[in-house]
Image (spheres, rainbow, N blue to C red):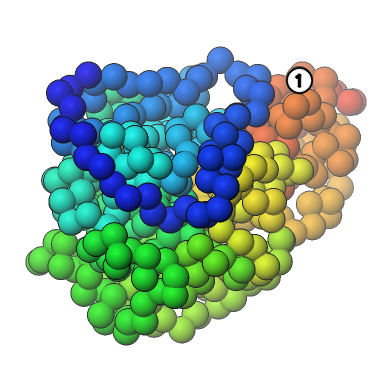
Amino acid sequence: MDSAAPPRTRIPLIIALAAVAAMAAALLTAPAPRAHAATLAPVTSFGTNPGNLAMYTYVPDGLPAGAPLVVLFHGCAQDATAYHGHSGWAGAADAGGFALVYAEQRTANNTTRCFNWFEAADVRRDSGEARSVRSMVEYAVSTHGLDADRVYASGLSAGGAMVSEVLSAYPDLFAGGAIVAGVPTGCATSMVDAFTCMNPGKNRTPQQWGDKVRAKNPGWSGPWPRVAVWHGTSDTTVVPANGTGSVRQWTNVHGISATPTATESLPGSTTAAYHGGTGATTAKVAHYTVSGMGHGTPVDPAAGCGAAGAYFLTAICSTGYTVDFWGLGGEGGDPDPQPTDEPTEGPGECVRATNYAHVQAGRAVQRLGRTHAVGSDDPLGLWNVFVTTSITETSPGYWNHTPGAC
């Protein structure tokens, strides 16, 4: 391990203040491991580490060269193991064919493992925790032969705030990000100020918010990362005004209107508002609002997306929709709202559909949340409505995975 920075005592931020110890215990209990050989692995030395962070990687078996990378930031009172076990990113990486890096905070830096998004020394380009994250990306890209032009970041709460900060500090490093129950870049520069950001939030114009991002890289003219913002309407820990602030910030940075160009109703009482495009695949900024949801990451265990727990709230597969927004779904396309409406097929004909639809139609079976083609037992990935695969009936009742579209 590189020489650690001197221990730093921080006051905990962006946590539910009641019953923290009990919630933390629940968070650290991960669900049973998935049925694959890839595992979450610590990386003890990954380069310069002035922020004294820990690094973990998850690289699906057989991942080809040039695959994308997603960097993940847990929330307060969490760690990499808990986030990996609950968020749904492991299954998304398996199905979509990309690698994961988890940045993990240490209690020496912050007593409840919050990323220090409010500390100027930790969010400046090539300083503190931000520099440690850059080292993780560079290490993962070099070690696993990943695509340096397709690096993304997502995080919850303090992790979501840190995502916004690293996207701002390194627009040349990240192609996109997802801010889940986080705050805008530059919202706070002290502990007291941070609590004000969290609740009741700060009201700034799009220009004022955008200037906070541009100040980190004077002279940078783009391209800027595409950003998805997720927030629950009943979040009292980090109030929804922060989601609105993040949308104002990143639309201004992209030079597009803060008024959406299109909206869409999604499962789980969720509304998607798209800015700078007519849908998830073309928008530069997307605002996903989950009605009635409190503070946490939206997951959908019934669809094979994550596991419910403290700060992992059953609503919608935010991970799946984020992957779709970034265009990292592998064979996956837009989530299919009616997965059972399928074309007529016969022996020898290729059928492209969601894994959920394949199972419903008897072309595949699901075991432990994974989908397998009937007959050949070819693995098709997660059993849900987000992963789309092509299979061919080579003989009556015998289906084979057919890579690529039919």
| 38 displayed left or right of 271 | left
Could you tell me which residue is drawn at 37 percent across and 46 percent down? 114
Q: Say above or below: 219 vs 106.
A: below
SS of the residue under disc 1: loop
Could you tell me which residue is drawn at 32 percent across and 42 percent down? 110
Hey, what amino acid is under mark 1? Asp
Pointer 1: what residue? Answer: 377
Q: Give the image location of residue 302, x and y in percent.
A: 76, 43
Quadrant assignment for the C terminus: top right
| 109 displayed left or right of 374 | left
| 28 displayed left or right of 106 | right
Q: Give the image location of residue 37, x and y in percent.
A: 56, 15
| 338 displayed left or right of 146 | right
Q: Give the image location of residue 156, x and y in percent.
A: 47, 51
Q: Give the image location of residue 68, x and y in percent.
A: 39, 38
Could you tell me which residue is drawn at 65 percent across and 19 percent down? 35
Label 1: how many residues lie within 10 Å, few (<14), some (14-19) or many (20+)? some
Task: Looking at this view, name the residue that lies furthest to the top.
Answer: 37
351 or 164: nearer the viewer: 164
